Image (spheres, rainbow, N blue to C red):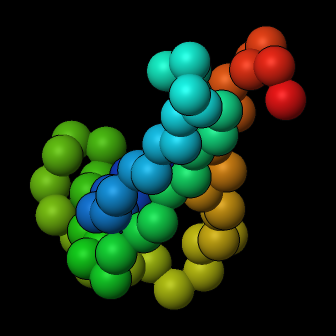
Amino acid sequence: MKEFTKITSGCVYQYFNEDGKCVRQKFVGDDIVEFEDENGGRIEPPFDYEYQLFDMVQPVGNGL
């Protein structure tokens, strides 16, 4: 297997100012996680993968 995909369920929180512009956002992951191989087949979680943070790109030019 050359690569695999980690699929994490969760919610995106988006915060807006009084002008209706998004000023920040964050992702909160759930405990529901699935792994797939490069063909989309379900696999068991690999033991030695590097944890990746769920950093989200913040809005640009939000006036803050």
The answer to whether residue 63 of the structure is visible from this angle is: yes
Q: Kindly give the residue lying farthest to the front in the view shown.
A: 18
Q: Residue at x 48, y 42 (%)?
A: 14
Q: Kindly give the residue lying farthest to the left in the view shown.
A: 41
Q: Residue at x 21, y 41 (%)?
A: 39
- Residue 30 position, x and y percent, is 34, 75
Q: Residue at x 66, y 62 (%)?
A: 53
Q: Nearer the viewer, residue 10 or 61?
A: 61
- Location of residue 23 with respect to 61 vertically, above or below: below
- Location of residue 10 with respect to 64 vertically, above or below: below
Q: Kindly give the residue lying farthest to the top in the view shown.
A: 61
Q: Residue at x 34, y 58 (%)?
A: 11
- Location of residue 2 with respect to 32 vertically, above or below: above
Image quarter (top left, top right, bottom left or bottom right) of the N terminus: bottom left
- Residue 43 position, x and y percent, is 23, 70
- Location of residue 53 with respect to 56 vertically, above or below: below
Image quarter (top left, top right, bottom left or bottom right) of the C terminus: top right
- Residue 44 position, x and y percent, is 27, 79
The answer to whether residue 1 of the structure is visible from this angle is: no
Tell whether 28 sits left or right of 17: left
Q: Nearer the viewer, residue 24 or 47?
A: 24
Tell whether 8 sits left or right of 16: left
Residue 25 position by quadrant: top right
